[in-house]
Image (spheres, rainbow, N blue to C red):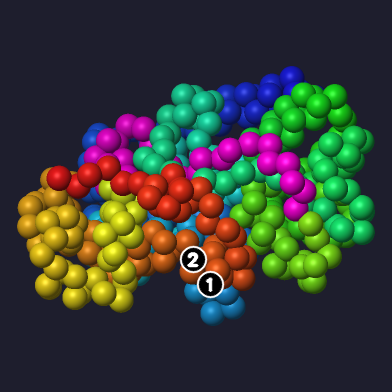
Amino acid sequence: MLKYLRNKWMLAAGCLMAATTVASAESGATQKSIKDRGMLNCGVSSGVQTGMSTLDSDAKWSGFEVDFCRAVAAAVLGDPEKIKFVPLEIKTAFATLQSGGIDLLARTATHTFVRDIELNVEWPGVYLYDSQGFLAKKSLGVKSAKELDGASICVSAGSNYELNLADYFRKNGLKFKPVAANTRDQNEKNLAAGRCDVYANVLSALAGAVSKLGNPDDWVVLPELISMEPIGPVVRKDDSRFRDIVAWTLNGLIAAEELGITRANVDEMKASSTSPEVQRLLGVTGDFGVKLGLDNSWAYNAIKTVGNYGEMFERNLGDKSPIKLDRGLNNLWNNKGLMSSPLIR
């Protein structure tokens, strides 16, 4: 099974490279295109993923991925509304980025070796540390993933989660039957309809599924976590300037949390803070925006739009959201987490 899935993924990656005309850009070309069209084209998940990207009945987008797109638009264009959201399944997401169909992929996409080396894309940072687990009905009576020998498992087609499953079951001498679907929404429907015994995905996705599957007490996430998934924004590898802009937009949001800057107090902090770090981040001193080819208010504009990293997480995925995902490793470095920003100096 492992060999089959790995070959399947390698073949898919090869087909993508062969079938796609890879956009070739000089450093700074992506930023110039965005400014010329007055619009950031940002790829997100399919619009039905609670917490990540949701398109409501009024055609309004919300979610963690959506907020990050808006932060980048605010940093580059000074206006978070100058943005086109492009909903993408994982099977087409990288090809769309490669071909120039989007400027930035902010969809949940795990950083892996094959994607990094073979697809001509790169991750400017990590904005979510997640882990793959299993969601099961309590009535199934399963207490551990090691009791899933022979189980049918819903999983996203074309994702690395298929490979993770194969690795885990092979390592533990177990067998399983994959029930692959193209979307998380379809996986959730398959699980609810009993077409699979359990659903395998990252914890944020499983928490989102529970929020939509009726009584949360009917479901249980099994204790085994079978992978660490570093998830972040993705850009084409041939434009280092735009890579820097996306990286430092993320770093700026994290630094804002470290420095106590919020969406509510950013104006006050910009006007009156005597902290050298705050003044540099908010463009009061230094020309850090200019060094990126942006206005010196780039970080101020991003923070004013979505708040700091912690606010963005809690609003979409944490206690202030329907998902209520524990922040865990996504806490700041000084609170037992992994989130930190390089120094802005």
Residue 37 in the figure: left or right of residue 227: left
- For disc 1, the marked residue is 320
In the image, what residue occupies the spot 86% across and 29% down?
174
Question: Callout 2, which amino acid?
Answer: Glu
Residue 118 in the figure: left or right of residue 168: left
Residue 15, x across and y down, in percent: 59, 28
* Label at residue 90: none
Q: Secondary structure at mark 2?
A: helix
Residue 27, x across and y down, in percent: 24, 36
In the image, what residue occupies the spot 14% across and 60% down?
275
Contact between labelled residues 2 and 1, with CB atoms less than 8 Å apart: yes
Q: Quarter holding the C terminus?
A: top left
The total number of labels drawn is: 2
Q: Say if 89 sits above or below 265 in the image.
A: above
* Label at residue 314: 2
Residue 166, x across and y down, in percent: 75, 29
Q: Is residue 229 magenta?
A: yes
Residue 74 makes an appearance in the image: no
Q: Quarter holding the N terminus?
A: top right
Q: Quadrant of residue 10?
A: top right
Region rendered in magenta:
221-247
Q: Earlier in the sequence, mark 1 or mark 2?
A: 2
Question: Callout 1, which amino acid?
Answer: Lys
Residue 285 makes an appearance in the image: yes
What is the C-alpha distance between the residues marked 1 and 2?
5 Å
